[in-house]
Image: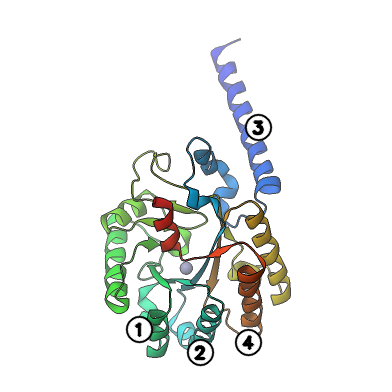
Amino acid sequence: MSFRFVVLLLVIHLFAAHILVMVVYNIVINPYDASIFTKIFPYQFLHNLYRRKPESALKSYFSFRLDIDTSEENVKKNDAGVQKLIRIADDHGVPITFSIATEYLPFFSEKTKEMIKNGEHAVITHGHSHEGYITEKEQEEELRRSKRILESEFQTEVKGLIAPKAKHDFETLKAAKKNSIEYISAGSLSYIRYWSFPYPFKKKDVWLLGGCVPSDYHLYERKRKSPEEALSLWKEAVEHRVRNQWFIQLEYHNFSTSEEKLKVLEELLRYVKEDTEAVPITLDEIVERSHT
Ligand SMILES: [Zn+2]
């Protein structure tokens, strides 16, 4: 047997094993994963096998994230809807993690900003311009600018980043670290406070099992689901996560605030809070709790 043949065999076996892991993960273990990255490379969870998870990571946390990131027109048009949404979340005791592309902050009404400040919510950065990033320098500048704007407007420390268009790479991590951003949350939630190469396999990183369930954008815009269909899918996904004591993140946008969609959202938040064991919490709080 020649050396090249052995290598070829090895590669074929590795590839087959990868396909098997992918299939088992996506069908049996986590059928509600909304992140393409973890769907294709579900290995981040191996990380949790060799280290004890913090006690706090064994709960099923539910994070409701509201992204405001599209256009001036969208922000203005949906301002009243966002206020209704905040009222619903407040009524049900569900804190919101606002992920804001700061270019659009000037188009928020004063009242909306007041409501964000007065609730038990968290504000994190979604970049300044919501553009997919290019160089480390540009990303660093975008993050610095966005963080400064948010911190002065909301009088809070900005600890988290949702990378615009879910585009984050090594440059993003470096830029985030330079701006004292503690975590990046996309499909799953991962800490970057201690990151170093080879990311993410560094001892002090914590990857929580679970992550995003399908977003409003995914269900309403791409899959053309009705609000009722979306509700039953979300309930199913939440139920699955709670059963497994996994982390849940619902990514939602200001453009899904029609009367009909808000009704469904209200029912979902009521369900999470009253009919499940899930703990509604902001992303900032999850990071904090998982450190202690
Ligand atoms: Zn976005």
Q: Earlier in the sequence, mark 4 or mark 3?
A: 3
State yes or no: discs 1 and 3 in contact (Cβ < 8 Å): no
Distance between the Cα atoms at labels 1 and 2? 15 Å
Q: Nearer the viewer, residue 133 or 140?
A: 140
Identify the residue position indicated by label 2 in the image.
80
Which of the marked residues, 2 or 3, is nearer the chain's N terminus?
3
Three-letter residue code for mark 4: Glu
Q: Of the residues shown, which amino acid type is indicated by label 3?
A: Ala
The answer to whether residue 61 of the structure is visible from this angle is yes
Q: Is mark 2 within 8 Å of ligand 1?
A: no
Q: Quadrant of residue 185?
A: bottom left
Give, as a three-letter code, the residue at label 2.
Ala
> Under tag 1, what secondary structure?
helix
Q: Quadrant of residue 155?
A: bottom left
Circles 1 and 2, Cβ within 8 Å, touching? The answer is no
Looking at the image, which is closer to me, 87 or 112? 87
Q: Which residue is mark 3?
A: 16
The kind of secondary structure element at disc 3 is helix
Which amino acid type corresponds to the residue marked 1 in the rendered image? Pro
